[in-house]
Image (cartoon, rainbow, N blue to C red):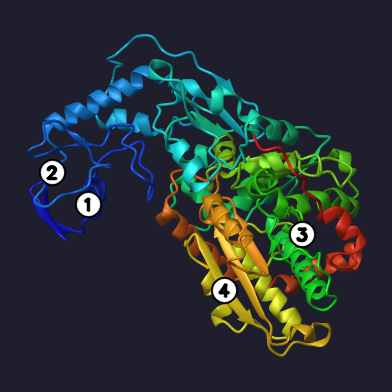
């Protein structure tokens, strides 16, 4: 332990902490633009300057380790002047266009300018020529707005392990961009949007589809349906001043109806359907491997709900593609069913149906446009909105969100179980799958407290659990006494670690869930900013609360899913479900 003084307050702290760590612990505000929780300090923005007694010049709080008897001042007049000068220099190169920027309401550099009383651009001179890159389906990059904080570089390289962005050139010509300042579609970018989620300004954002959706809603010839992912209901309220983790499911449904959607459905319905298909696929692979002794059965089986993860596998680990579940994501299953099963039910020509998704994920925009995603005979999902885009649509339509009364989803694609709700959390897909698979095999409920598989919950990067199967029935007697080994990873760098250990033979599992974004979908690239672990934990808690309040909490008990199989699909992994709900993935050249 070290003794030091910060703002005349004597404190005792652990060795190895930075000045910023100490300030946070004692509720002392130090501004920063480049710092990311739990990541290596960069000291790139220089906004977090503080004075240390005996030091000639101010130091960056985020990258300076504390020392014994250090005396720190974070609020002197000289420090305020230094910080103000740094912010003014950043503004001198930032082409803000605040009146038209999508971040005008929550821009971090604008907030700093207000905090430090900056009302004019003090340093005026040459500005770099901006580059607007709209080459991908999901993301838009505007280099003129970039303040070179390098947050996007850090999250892309150390959290996602993709490294699609890096500083290019030097000096005044420096820009944060793909290699050689190429467009994003010329390098391996999984379009997860974590760069957009942590960008403090408007330099990287989701590519908006708001106007396309408004046009569809205003077209009297179109029947427009919308589906909402589980993570939306625990985050959308933040855009309207509610605390993180506030459940706004009913208000969200009312807002979507007020926008003019002809039917409001729940992606959770097809999350339950995913469990039926994916769980059956897993049990089938286990039977083929253990009973039929087929040597070519790919185990462990990986979940396939997260499109960024799929693209990562196609580029970086194509040898594992056979291990991916063939199931489409719940978003794409819904689109295929909406334009077949539901369209027939309501007597609407599928060519006149428009399917809109509201997702926490920017990569869903890319996924909807994959050439494989047209099993209905049309593009299964037409437009994808992020949580942030939906909030903007609600505000543009003068809807007072917080005063709305709660409404229910439409049927038959709106009923879901609690198992589907927790799809939004890291570990949630695994828990939902185990709830169903265990009961199918043994005839009994999962023998855990309140049906939760706590070993795979929480924000640890890689989690694992082992479950011994006893009392196996009928066709599943071959699993009697077997130990089912499962793992969960979130954030692609954690997935990489898991894959490398499996490749080396150090680890052995039967089933693995991977989510691209930290925390799973509740931390997706399209969610309200700024998302740190405290916010993730509150959103996760909200979805577990939603799960525990449901009448049905296991996917196979969803009566509308059962009805879907009876009326339309036949059985899991059947001919029609294979055509509509399953797909394949291809090796892609890594750049």
Find numbered disc 4 in the image and state the secondary structure of the residue it sits on. strand
Q: Are marks 1 and 2 in contact (CB under 8 Å)?
A: yes
Q: Are marks 4 and 2 in contact (CB under 8 Å)?
A: no
* Callout in the foreground (3, 4): 4
Mark 1 surroundings: few (<14), some (14-19) or many (≥20) residues within 10 A: many
* Callout in the foreground (3, 2): 2
Check disc 2 and report the residue beneath it: 72
Residue most extreme to the front? 504
The CA distance from mark 3 to mark 1 is 53 Å
Mark 3 surroundings: few (<14), some (14-19) or many (≥20) residues within 10 A: some
The mark found on residue 411 in the picture is 3
391 lies above or below 27: above
Q: Are marks 3 and 4 in contact (CB under 8 Å)?
A: no
Using the rendered view, name the quadrant where residue 125 is placed. top left
The mark found on residue 191 in the picture is none
Sequence-first tag of 1 and 4: 1
Name the quadrant of the N terminus: bottom left
Check disc 4 and report the residue beneath it: 465
Query: Residue drawn 43% across and 23% down?
Result: 98
* Callout in the foreground (3, 1): 1
The CA distance from mark 1 to mark 2 is 10 Å
Find numbered disc 3 in the image and state the secondary structure of the residue it sits on. loop
Q: Foreground: 540 or 471?
A: 471
């Amino acid at each position: 332990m070290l003794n030091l003084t910060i703002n005349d307050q004597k404190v005792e702290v652990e060795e190895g902490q930075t000045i910023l760590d100490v300030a946070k612990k004692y509720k002392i505000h130090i501004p920063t633009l480049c710092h990311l929780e739990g990541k290596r300090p960069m000291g790139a923005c220089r906004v977090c300057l503080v004075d240390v007694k005996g030091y000639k010049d101010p130091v960056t709080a985020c990258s300076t380790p504390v020392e014994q008897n250090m005396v720190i001042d974070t609020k002197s007049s000289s420090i305020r002047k230094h910080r103000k000068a740094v912010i003014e220099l950043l503004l001198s190169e930032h082409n803000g266009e605040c009146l038209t920027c999508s971040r005008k309401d929550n821009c971090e550099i604008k907030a700093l300018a207000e905090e430090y009383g900056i009302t004019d651009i003090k340093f005026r001179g040459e500005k770099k020529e901006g580059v607007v890159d709209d080459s991908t389906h999901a993301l838009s990059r505007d280099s003129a707005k970039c303040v070179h904080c390098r947050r996007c570089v850090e999250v892309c390289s150390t959290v996602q392990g993709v490294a699609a962005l890096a500083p290019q050139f030097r000096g005044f010509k420096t820009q944060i961009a793909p290699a050689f300042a190429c467009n994003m579609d010329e390098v391996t970018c999984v379009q997860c949007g974590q760069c957009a989620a942590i960008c403090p300004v408007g330099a990287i954002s989701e590519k908006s589809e708001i106007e396309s959706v408004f046009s569809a809603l205003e077209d009297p010839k179109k029947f427009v349906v919308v589906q909402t992912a589980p993570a939306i209901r625990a985050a959308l309220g933040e855009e309207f001043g509610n605390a993180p983790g506030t459940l706004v499911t009913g208000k969200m449904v009312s807002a979507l109806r007020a926008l003019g959607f002809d039917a409001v459905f729940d992606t959770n319905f097809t999350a339950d359907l995913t469990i039926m298909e994916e769980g059956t696929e897993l049990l089938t692979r286990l039977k083929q491997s253990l009973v039929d002794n087929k040597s070519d059965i790919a185990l462990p089986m990986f979940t396939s709900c997260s499109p960024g993860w799929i693209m990562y596998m196609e580029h970086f680990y194509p040898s594992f593609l056979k291990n991916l579940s063939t199931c489409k994501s719940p978003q794409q299953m819904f689109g295929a069913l909406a334009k077949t099963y539901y369209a027939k039910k309501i007597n609407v020509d599928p060519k006149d149906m428009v399917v809109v998704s509201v997702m926490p994920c920017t990569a869903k925009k890319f996924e909807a446009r994959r050439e494989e995603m047209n099993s209905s005979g049309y593009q299964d999902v037409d437009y994808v909105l992020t949580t942030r885009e939906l909030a903007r649509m609600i505000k543009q339509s003068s809807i007072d969100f917080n005063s709305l009364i709660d409404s229910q989803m439409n049927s038959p694609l709106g009923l879901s179980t609690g198992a589907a709700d927790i799809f939004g959390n890291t570990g949630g897909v695994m828990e939902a799958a185990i709830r169903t698979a265990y009961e199918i095999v043994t005839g009994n409920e999962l023998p855990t407290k309140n049906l939760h598989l706590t070993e795979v919950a929480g924000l640890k990067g890689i989690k694992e659990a082992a479950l011994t199967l006893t009392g196996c029935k009928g066709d599943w007697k071959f699993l009697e006494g077997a130990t089912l080994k499962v793992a969960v990873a979130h954030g692609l760098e954690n997935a990489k670690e898991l894959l490398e250990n499996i490749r080396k033979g150090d680890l052995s599992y039967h089933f693995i869930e991977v989510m691209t974004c930290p925390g799973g979908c509740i931390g997706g690239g399209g969610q309200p900013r700024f998302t740190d672990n405290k916010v993730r934990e509150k959103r996760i808690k909200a979805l577990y609360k939603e799960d525990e309040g449901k009448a049905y909490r296991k996917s196979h008990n969803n009566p509308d899913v059962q009805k879907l199989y009876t009326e339309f699909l036949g059985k899991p992994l059947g001919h029609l479900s294979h055509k509509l709900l399953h797909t394949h993935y291809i090796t892609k050249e890594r750049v």
